[in-house]
Image (cartoon, helix red, strand yellow):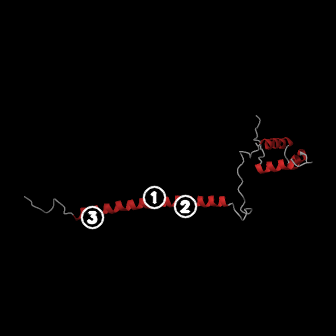
């Protein structure tokens, strides 16, 4: 029986594709030279150029978004992203506090029930017992 191998396909980001198309679109530059220098097949570059002209050039849907390395993170962050991070952090804090509140309320309810139970026990122990000491005829 033959063994099947899973094929490895290179996946390229939209930025990479756009850069390749821009390089190939320079006057006097051959697409074959650009493709060769990038290590991609020239037909792939032609397809990217055609998709770019049609406005259909997209990022690969199977690509996982790259997370920026902490070392390469710019000192200035996007204000919108910063606000979103603050909002996410606040939402997590709210969820944690709501959970703590629910636990505290449950503890209070249990303590109230315990208090009521102990009060009933005290009442029963203070009542005189019937059946002993009384009229015997």
Q: Which residue is mark 1?
A: 102
Q: Quadrant of the N terminus?
A: top right
The residue where tag 3 is placed is 122
Q: Where, by quadrant of the figure, is residue 73 drawn? A: bottom right
Q: Which of 45 and 22 lies nearest the eye of the viewer?
A: 22
Which residue in the protein does label 2 denote?
A: 93
Give coordinates of residue 75: x percent, y percent. Answer: 72, 65
Q: Which of 36 and 124 lies nearest the eye of the viewer?
A: 36
Residues 54 and 65: in front is 54
The answer to whether 117 appears left or right of 74 in the picture is left
Q: Is residue 38 toward the left or the right of residue 133 in the image?
A: right
Q: Nearer the viewer, mark 2 or mark 1?
A: 2
Q: Residue at 71% across / 64% down in the picture?
A: 76
Residue 34 to residue 71: above or below: above
Assign a secondary structure to mark 1. Answer: helix
Badge 3 or badge 1: first in the primary sequence: 1
């Amino acid at each position: 029986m033959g063994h099947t191998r899973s094929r490895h396909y290179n996946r390229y980001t939209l930025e990479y594709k756009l850069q390749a198309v821009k390089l190939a679109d320079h006057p006097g530059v051959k697409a074959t030279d650009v493709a060769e220098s990038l290590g991609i097949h020239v037909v792939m570059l032609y397809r990217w150029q055609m998709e770019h002209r049609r406005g259909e050039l997209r990022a690969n849907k199977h690509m996982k978004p790259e997370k920026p390395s902490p070392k390469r993170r710019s000192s200035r962050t996007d204000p919108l992203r910063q606000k979103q991070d603050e909002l996410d952090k606040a939402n997590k804090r709210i969820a944690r506090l709501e959970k703590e509140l629910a636990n505290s309320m449950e503890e209070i309810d249990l303590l109230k029930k315990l208090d009521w139970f102990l009060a009933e026990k005290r009442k029963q122990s203070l009542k005189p017992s019937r059946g002993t000491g009384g009229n015997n005829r």
